[in-house]
Amino acid sequence: DAGVIQSPRHEVTEMGQEVTLRCKPISGHDYLFWYRQTMMRGLELLIYFNNNVPIDDSGMPEDRFSAKMPNASFSTLKIQPSEPRDSAVYFCASTTTSGRSNEQFFGPGTRLTVL
Amino acid sequence: SQQGEEDPQALSIQEGENATMNCSYKTSINNLQWYRQNSGRGLVHLILIRSNEREKHSGRLRVTLDTSKKSSSLLITASRAADTASYFCATDRNFNKFYFGSGTKLNVKP
């Protein structure tokens, strides 16, 4: 398996623009997570899905953020409109409940810069 | 907050020395995991210890858990330059909602 795939790897945009981050989890994994990492706040859980259904979105900072998982192999995190304080590295991770370990597998991240 | 906090924030050692990192958390947990993050990369799982376990080994890694003190430690023995990375503990109360600490940045000098 190729692991968790994220795109784009880098995104530079201007304030006010819409940004869409994409994630393909590992095949067979039934949980998908979106995290944001900054120097100031560390690694924060934004939202997670189980079997494509959002379970907990309490970490989503504002209504400007939205996430979807239309099927088991694809998820998006959208920011509209973007602001400079959204600049961060966004990680997607997946895991499965079929094993004893709930080890999370992380993608390489998307580095977002909002000017 | 249940968030784990690592200590120290940064650690610099010579190759061959042992490195010890600590993690403290606030509420009861099911599992505690340690992850490594190399610069510019995603996190990679190292080891999991369950709340009913006290110690676990994996290669050069040794993890301890003291639930009475709500703390864990990660020991890397005979460190190598390739161990240079940030190390995070992650705790979960339910199966999948993880809380990550702020990490310990380890620098192993060759």
Image: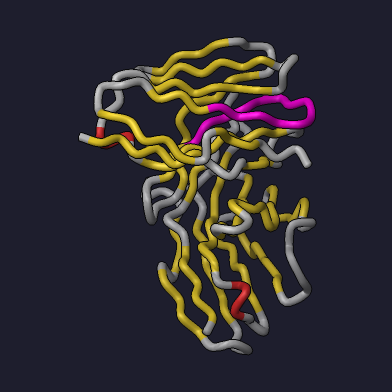
In the rendered structure, does residue B26 fall within the stretch colored magenta?
Answer: yes
Whether residue B66 sits left or right of residue B8 in the image: it is right
- Residue B14 is situated, as x and y percent measured from the top left of the image, at 27, 29
Q: Quadrant of the N terminus of chain B?
A: top right
Pick whichever, A98 or A48, lies toward us. A48
- Residue B46 is situated, as x and y percent measured from the top left of the image, at 45, 30
A33 w.r.t. A80: above or below:
above
Name the residue located 60 percent from the left edge and 84 percent from the top edge.
Answer: A18
Observer able to see residue A34: no
Whether residue B33 sits left or right of residue B4 in the image: it is left
In the rendered structure, does residue A12 fall within the stretch colored magenta?
Answer: no
B56 w.r.t. B23: above or below:
above
Pick whichever, A107 or A75, lies toward us. A107
Looking at the rendering, the stretch of residues picked out in magenta corresponds to: B22-35
B83 w.r.t. B63: above or below:
below
Name the residue located 51 percent from the left edge and 63 percent from the top edge.
Answer: A89
Q: Quadrant of the C terminus of chain B?
A: top left
- Residue B90 is situated, as x and y percent measured from the top left of the image, at 61, 36
- Residue A44 is situated, as x and y percent measured from the top left of the image, at 64, 53
Pick whichever, A55 or B82, lies toward us. B82
Observer able to see residue A18: yes
